[in-house]
Amino acid sequence: MMLIPGPVNVPKSVAMKSTIVMNHRSDRFRKVVGELEELMRKHFGASRVSLLTGSGTLAVESMVFSLLKKGENIIVLSYGEFSERLLDSVIKRGTAPKVYRKPFGGSFTLEEFKSILDENKDASAIAFVHNETSTGIAFRDLKGIVGLAKSRGMKVLVDSVSGFAAYEIRVDEWKIDGIATGSQKALASVPGVGFVALSKQGVEELQEDVPNYLNVKLHLRFQDKRETPFTPAVGAFFATLEAARLLEREGIENRWRRHDACARFLRKITSEMNFRLLGNESNFSNTVVAGVPPISPKTLIQELEKRGIEISGGIGELRDKIVRIGILGLVDDRAISRLSYTLADILKTDLSVSPPVECKLPEFLREEVDWSD
């Protein structure tokens, strides 16, 4: 059973679709491109969504290069390993970033965010990671943060690679200029497809002095013809369309609630088992529970692996210091229960509670996922 921050366990129908190989200029594949963007626009609540072949990092770099101008004054908030990757992309774009950092495991409050905006009235854009899988910390009030920045007339760029489909996101309504994600996270598809969702204003902000493979504007021009500018990961596109259809059947708001319910339950259980968790009610992640276990992280990871459960250790500054449990995609009450009882066995503690009903998958999805392996 794989419970890492991505890639994730995928439904059987999604895995089967990933084996398809065909002419990417065929009418059949044009239907895939057209329907995939249509569904992703609905899931994001966005004006447009570019479909990219690559990882979440490729989507983030495409967003950064396509929406920012060289020399532009931009605020970057960093509070984990993936925030630093975002900053690296911003620097390589040739902008003039003003960086605010928190120690890994820290977060920015709304008041701090207001002060940062007040200190940088010359900044025209802000970029940040929505959900830091390196620390299990997130901007839970994304709407409030975006609203403050937009009230100052700023462009807002969000790396939500591990956040999309696990939290409420409404791109057009909240006027998010660009937000990036990948197929292999809470969407629950195979790796290989990246997305940049854009508001109407974000589409108007797209730049042309961008390497072709990162050029969101170029991708959208081809998508107008229901094509991609370059050879895509055909199988991953078919699989991801199936995942987007399954998300449509589950309902995006139901998926938001399921992630929140599973995360709250696992945080409660691990806290009672004497984990020292990163984050609190104001900033915890819906997709990763991270913290210091009561035994060494290495030992816990090894003991779980012996019992057929894979979790992750820390990365960057937190390497060998914490464990990270990924609960994104189609993780449900069955997976959480198996993990919880296995932790209780390893740590010699009692467990007398069960996951909440909101943590369950709808029946049609329960049949698609096997957590016994």
Image (spheres, rainbow, N blue to C red):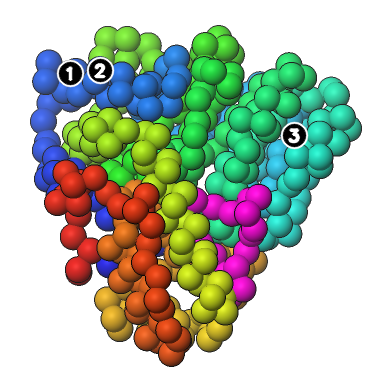
Residue 265: x and y, percent? 46, 61
The amino acid pointed to by label 3 is Ile
Q: Quarter holding the C terminus?
A: bottom left
Label 3 neighbour load within 10 Å: few <14, some 14-19, many 20+ = many
Label 1 neighbour load within 10 Å: few <14, some 14-19, many 20+ = few
- What is the distance, in whole Å, between disc 1 and disc 2 at their CAs? 5 Å
Say whether marks 1 and 3 touch (CB < 8 Å). no
Residue beneath disc 1: 31
The amino acid pointed to by label 2 is Gly
Q: Secondary structure at mark 2?
A: helix
Residue beneath disc 3: 75
The amino acid pointed to by label 1 is Lys
Residue beneath disc 2: 34
Q: Quadrant of residue 234?
A: top left
Say whether marks 2 and 3 touch (CB < 8 Å). no
Residue found 32% across the figure and 10% down from its top: 224
Task: Tell me which numbered mark, 1 or 3, is placed earlier along the sequence.
Answer: 1
Foreground: 368 or 27?
Answer: 368
Residue 142: x and y, percent? 61, 35
Residue 288 visible in the current orientation:
no
Magenta: main secondary structure equals loop
Say whether marks 1 and 2 touch (CB < 8 Å). yes
Q: Which residues are drawn in magenta?
A: 276-293
Q: Is residue 214 rendered to the left or right of residue 184? A: right
Q: Is residue 352 rendered to the left or right of residue 277? A: left
